[in-house]
Image (cartoon, grey):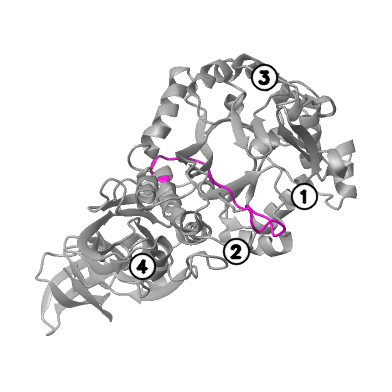
Amino acid sequence: MKYTFCYLLLSVYCVLSFAQIPGNIIVCPDSEKTAISPLIFGSGDEMSSCFSPLTETRPLIAATKPSLLRFGGIGAEYLDWEADSLGGVFYIDFVDTLLIPGAVNFGVDSFLRLCEVINAEPILTVNMHIADTALARRMVEYVNADTTTPMGQLRAQRGHPEPYNVSIWSLGNEPDIAGGEWPVPPWGTLTFYRHFGIPFANWSWQDSVFWTPQDFANLIPLYVNAMEGASPIPLEFIYSIAGEPSWIRPVIQPNLNLIDYLDVHYYASSAWDSIADTTDYIEWLSKTDTIFPCEPFIQMYRDSLDAIGASHIELVILEYNSGIIMVPDPLWWNYLTGLFIADCIGHFMHAGLKMAGVYSIHEGDTDNPSDFPYFGIIRGDSVSRRMPSYVLELYNTYFGDTLIYAFSDHKNTGYGIESWASKRSSDNKYVLMVINKTLDTTYTMTIQLEDSVQSYHLYNITNNAVIGAPYNGTTGIEDQGAFVPDSIRTGWSYLTLNFEAASVSLFEVSPYLSIKESFSGPRTNFLLPTIIRKGSSISIPFGTHVLYTVTGREIYKWCDTETIKIPHVPDGIYFIQVKGSTFKKIIIF
């Protein structure tokens, strides 16, 4: 890990003496074994987003490799998706001030074609605010129906004859924030969802009509029936809340058989200061483990579902970030929030979530370069990637499909070294993610993995560039090459490396071929593990096999068998003669 941390230091205008602390990371492949859903490495954005300029942002979104993209957010409740020739019209709404409709110039087609190009699972959100089931039904018909239907024919006329076949739909967005206020100086105050049941054409800046949990519960069967009736493929439905528990029972209990997912949004912090400092950074980075930890947060809502007989409804988190942190701080938003997101994904895997989405995939506009983008992991003002974009790429490219046990003895209270590990079924490699969330401490960690390892291939993200665009603090994922274990003892492999402050490191770990891997294919060209533990049982072609010392002394024989058990002999190099002919050199330990 060759780069220094000077850019981060310059950004926070301080000089720190770097500590270097030893520690251990323990990885046990045979422990935990939780299935990892590929849809946990997703993202999303507002229904009113346009990802401008798309020709420049699309390659960056593709490089991020989000496994899913949710098109939703508060914008979904202010969007007329059919207006402006299906390009969409978004209503800017400031109470007692003004109400302005504006063209989005993107629309459902553009979003779904983007998902096709980057191979992301799309999730669409229907507007529930105006209580117009026909508007939702037409969207589903446009997206999923064939060309014998009016909306399917319209889709074909617009250049996409084949249905998009979107199967996952969100029923509105965060109805539990209705009546809440969001100050937007100097324009006024946005009061959420004050036009309940009023068609777009009749909206007024004087409206003050809000839904209740009972109102929303009554809408769900109407929407589900209308949408299912327009789709030739089965649909799954998401009920999405900001997190208010009082909106769970009254909405879900009457609709137990209609809702497939409860989407609760996770924003661990809130800040409205104009300036952030190191104390803020440490608090925000620690939130996944302390103060507002992920697993208890998830369990609280699962318990709420269990209490009303809704344990079959999957909990998902389709909006999350370090928080509603409205601080225009380049150091935090360009770089450090990537550490939070890297660790947050690990906690979500540990909790067994099926879907998760970083909010948001993109933010900013080249036409308004002075408007600082907060949440977007891809900047639209300068069209550049931030650290969280590279974090998603690492996970989506390399991480496995089964979570295995990993433990860091310097996790501290969430401000230290975090570690997450997996196994890939495609090639039986292990993958280890190590996140140093500290700002000023290099850790010298010994990775102790319970298997015989041939090599570790390291990729990392470090603060090796200026904090402003286009680098936003990092040159991206650096390939640091392969390492061999420092030692292998009694079935454990050891490797000691330095982990820089504020860095994310991923190891692809290649073990020596296991018994199962060695002999799962045809026996004609079988492979014998090079390093074998005492007492191991190994499959081998049927016959008589002999174990020799390096001096040629016979010390063990297996007769007429296709399974041999390695005897407890002194550690060292030996030869096995297979079926009286081929010699294989092995190391027994």
Residue 48 is drawn in which quadrant? top right
389 over 103 or under it: above or below: below
In three-dimensional space, the C-alpha distance between marks 1 and 4, rounded to whole angstroms, equals: 45 Å
In three-dimensional space, the C-alpha distance between marks 2 and 4, rounded to whole angstroms, equals: 33 Å
In three-dimensional space, the C-alpha distance between marks 2 and 3, rounded to whole angstroms, equals: 39 Å
- The three-letter code of the residue at mark 4 reads Ser
- At mark 3, the secondary structure is loop
Pointer 4 residue: 510
193 over 434 or under it: above or below: above
Q: Is residue 172 visible?
A: no
Q: Earlier in the sequence, mark 2 or mark 4?
A: 2
Q: Earlier in the sequence, mark 1 or mark 4?
A: 1
460 over 353 or under it: above or below: below
Q: Is residue 237 magenta?
A: no
Judging depth in this view, the residue of 446 and 121 nearest the camera is: 446
Q: In the image, which residues are magenta?
A: 349-371
| Disc 1 residue crowd, few under 14, some 14–19, many 20+, Cα 10 Å | many
In three-dimensional space, the C-alpha distance between marks 3 and 1, rounded to whole angstroms, equals: 29 Å
Q: Earlier in the sequence, mark 2 or mark 3?
A: 3
Along the horizontal axis of the image, is 203 left or right of 432? right
Pointer 2 residue: 384
In three-dimensional space, the C-alpha distance between marks 1 and 2, rounded to whole angstroms, equals: 20 Å
The reply to whether discs 2 and 4 touch (Cβ–Cβ < 8 Å) is no
Q: Main secondary structure of the magenta part?
A: loop
Judging depth in this view, the residue of 163 and 128 nearest the camera is: 128
| Disc 2 residue crowd, few under 14, some 14–19, many 20+, Cα 10 Å | many
- The three-letter code of the residue at mark 3 reads Phe
Pointer 1 residue: 106
Pointer 3 residue: 210
Q: Earlier in the sequence, mark 1 or mark 2?
A: 1
